[in-house]
Image (spheres, grey):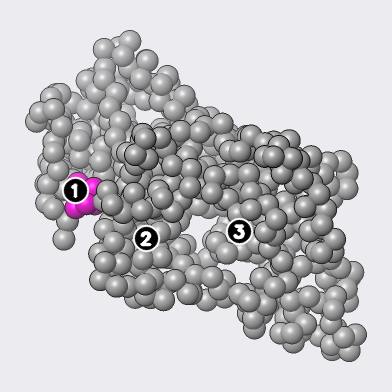
Amino acid sequence: MAPSSRPCGPSESSYLSGLVWFRRDLRTADHAALYRALTQCKQVHCAFVLDREILDGLPRRDRRVEFILASLEELDASLRALCGHPQGGLIVLHAVASEAIPALAQSLGVQAVFANHDDEPQALARDSLVRTRLAAAGKAFHTFKDHTIFERSEVLTQTGNPYSVFTPYKNAWLKKIDAFQLQSYPVERHAHRLAPRPQAHCQPVPALASLGFEASVSPAPGLPTGARGAQQLFDDFLGRIERYDHARDFPAVKGPSYLSVHLRFGTISPRVLARTAHGLAQAGNPGAATWLSELIWRDFYFQILHHHPHVVGHSFKPAYDAIQWETGPEADALFAAWCEGRTGYPLVDAAMAQINQTGYMHNRLRMVVASFLVKDLGIDWRRGEAYFATHLNDFDLAANNGGWQWASSSGCDAQPYFRIFNPVSQSEKFDPEGKFIRRYLPQLAALPAKALHAPWLARPLELQEAGVHLGATYPLPVVEHDAARQRTLERYAVVKTAAG
């Protein structure tokens, strides 16, 4: 069990009233900003802004918006239950957040706004504007760590510099972790300070259509929403976490936790996850130790983004910005084939079908398809990063950027540029029976396993009996891997020259 209390800040009831601004933290349990507000204010209002500056740039069908709305409904119900008042609950606005929050704070008459940190550049700019507007009205703006275990400059080298290599960072993280960092905020004991909503703000969470969005054609299967959904997934994962270190690499196996979207939107506390994983790892659970490393990777990428914001749009290693990527109509056609799962490499195409159909992609496959785009097709990693940003339910700038830069060898602690995933051997190793490929490429389902990973090498009779017509029912490979590998080594020579 976690320790039962946390420091309450400067003093109890510093303010008559406050406003908690929910963002990427859609839960009431173990919530830093909510706890701080409840312990520093006599009355606390809660709000979420469906920010037009974000929503207006999204496709009109976006599973993430559906996930957020469903999670907001649960958050609203949770706040109403905690408040114990018929008008309790969440104030939900559809507006420009940088304008709406100061205006709401003014209309509610609160003295302070409380929120949790968001270190993405766009969010920092928004928060700076909100802080300025609140200050002009004589109101405070307090933000807190909640999205990670360690953030910003909490884990540094002995010389006071940020880490750029994961393993030393992980070792320092593990050395620094203690019960205080992993304990939960006891929100419930202070819930009596939640204020009922003013009559003007008692509307329910808006419907998808009222925001100008349409329902997804194929909703993400088996993706429970809200804090209850997150807990359901976590409970299920704990029953198989011991096998995670091995099972996580096989896309046809139920290996991952599937909690990434819940971590992204904060429907579960990262402290709860890390505390559980850390305890199991210390008890000798190999899967838990591996999963804890994944949580530490998450913290690592967030601190990279904080200390090196140039990674948004540029290579972490500047020399890699000198690489000449393929451009023009042929490159655009290859990129389209990659996006649409028409490369002729079954594991790559099945992975792209998975993301296109569900908004999720298995982590091993994210590495495979990223390597293929960058090092087989010679296309700028930023194009793939942007595609994932649009299509992944769990899109998180820090992790997505870190993953793509890792695959392109341009990031911190990335794989060397001369290590290039072979999509066929990856397929044979991690989907040996072809179960995953058959699930997402039914046109290849009748092929025997040996022929499934590289259909162009199959015997004509095997193709005929399986009803596969290369170039018609399934494409021929858009590139030849060995030749593409050689071109990549030549393309990356500029990096080797710069390093020398």
Kind of residue sitting beneath label 2? Leu
Residue at position x 52%, y 32% in the image: 309
Question: Could you say where residue 9 lies in the image, as x and y percent from the top left?
Answer: 15, 32
The answer to which quarter of the image holds residue 424 is: bottom right
Are the residues flagged by discs 1 and 2 in contact, CB closer than 8 Å?
no
Q: Nearer the viewer, residue 176 or 206?
A: 176
Q: Residue furthest front?
A: 500
Q: CA distance from mark 3 to mark 2?
A: 20 Å
Left or right side of 462 for 263? left
Left or right side of 425 for 271? left
Kind of residue sitting beneath label 1? Phe
Kind of residue sitting beneath label 3? Arg
Which segment is the magenta one? 178-185
Label 3 packing within 10 angstroms: few (<14), some (14-19), many (20+): many
Question: Could you say where residue 324 lies in the image, as x and y percent from the top left?
Answer: 79, 39
Secondary structure of the residue carrying tag 2 is helix
Secondary structure of the residue carrying tag 1 is helix
Mark closer to the chain start, 1 or 3: 1
Q: Which residue is mark 1?
A: 180
Question: Could you say where residue 266 lies in the image, as x and y percent from the top left?
Answer: 37, 48
